Image (cartoon, rainbow, N blue to C red):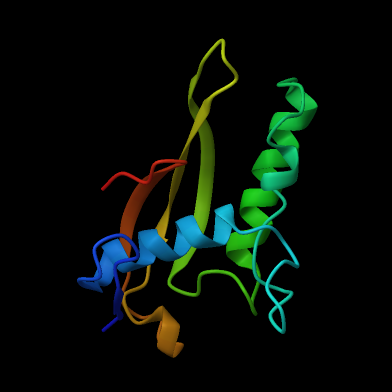
C-alpha cells in the first residue's frame, strides 16, 4: 500500500490521495531543479506565462505527459491516458483534467490491479 505524509496537514496519506499529491508534486516542480534528482519535475512551470495559443497548450499537454511517464522521476502508480482543458479563463488560468489508470501497487512494480481515476491540475480534486 502507498503511504506518505500529507504536505499540508502532516497526516498519514494513503492510496489515491497519496498518488494525487505525487502527481501535483511532479507537475509543479521545475525540471532539473532538485539537486541529485534532476530527472524529477516538469516543464509546465516554464510555460506558465506563455501565450495561450494552441501550440502552447499542446506543449503543456506534452510537458504533463512527459513528467508523469518518466520512468525515473514520474509517478509509477499512474498511467495517463487523456488530458483535456476543463476550463480556461480570461485571466489566463487553465484547469486540466487528467484521466488515467491508478495502480495501487505500481510503486512496487505490480501493475496487476488498477482503477480508472481522474484528477484535475492545478488544484487536484478527488
In this rendering, the answer to whether 69 lies above or below 119 is below
Is residue 57 shown above or below 51? below
Task: Decide which of 38, 16 is in the foreground and name it.
Answer: 38
Most distant residue in the bottom direction: 108
Above-or-below relation of 52 to 33: above
The residue shown at (68%, 35%) is 48
Quarter-wise, where is residue 30 in the image?
A: bottom right
Q: Quadrant of residue 55?
A: top right
Q: Which of 52 and 69 is in front in this view?
A: 52
Q: Locate residue 27, reporting x and y percent.
A: 57, 54
Residue at the image point whose x is 63% and y is 53% from the top: 65
Q: Which residue is drawn at 74% across and 75% down?
A: 38
Residue 30 horizontal side relative to residue 15, left or right: right
Q: Locate residue 119, reporting x and y percent.
A: 37, 46
Position of residue 97 measured from the top left corner of the image (x, y, whole percent) = 45, 38
Q: Which residue lies furthest to the top in this view?
A: 90
Q: In which quarter of the image is residue 11?
A: bottom left
In terms of depth relative to the viewer, which is nearer, 63 or 122? 122
Residue at (26, 84) in percent of width and height: 1
Q: In this view, does 46 lie above or below 107?
A: above
The image shows residue 50 at horizontal and vertical percentages of: 76, 28
Disc count in the image?
0
Amino acid at each position: 500500500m502507498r503511504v506518505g505524509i500529507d504536505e499540508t496537514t502532516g497526516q498519514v496519506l494513503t492510496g489515491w490521495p497519496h498518488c494525487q499529491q505525487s502527481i501535483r508534486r511532479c507537475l509543479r516542480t521545475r525540471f532539473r531543479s532538485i539537486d541529485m534528482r534532476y530527472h524529477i519535475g516538469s516543464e509546465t512551470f516554464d510555460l506558465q506565462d506563455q501565450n495561450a495559443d494552441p501550440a502552447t497548450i499542446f506543449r503543456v499537454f506534452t510537458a504533463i505527459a512527459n513528467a508523469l511517464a518518466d520512468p525515473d522521476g514520474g509517478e509509477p502508480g499512474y498511467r495517463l491516458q487523456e488530458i483535456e482543458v476543463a476550463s480556461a479563463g480570461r485571466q489566463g488560468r487553465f484547469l486540466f483534467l487528467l484521466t488515467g489508470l491508478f495502480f495501487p501497487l505500481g510503486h512496487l512494480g505490480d501493475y496487476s490491479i488498477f482503477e480508472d481515476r481522474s484528477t484535475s491540475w492545478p488544484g487536484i480534486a478527488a
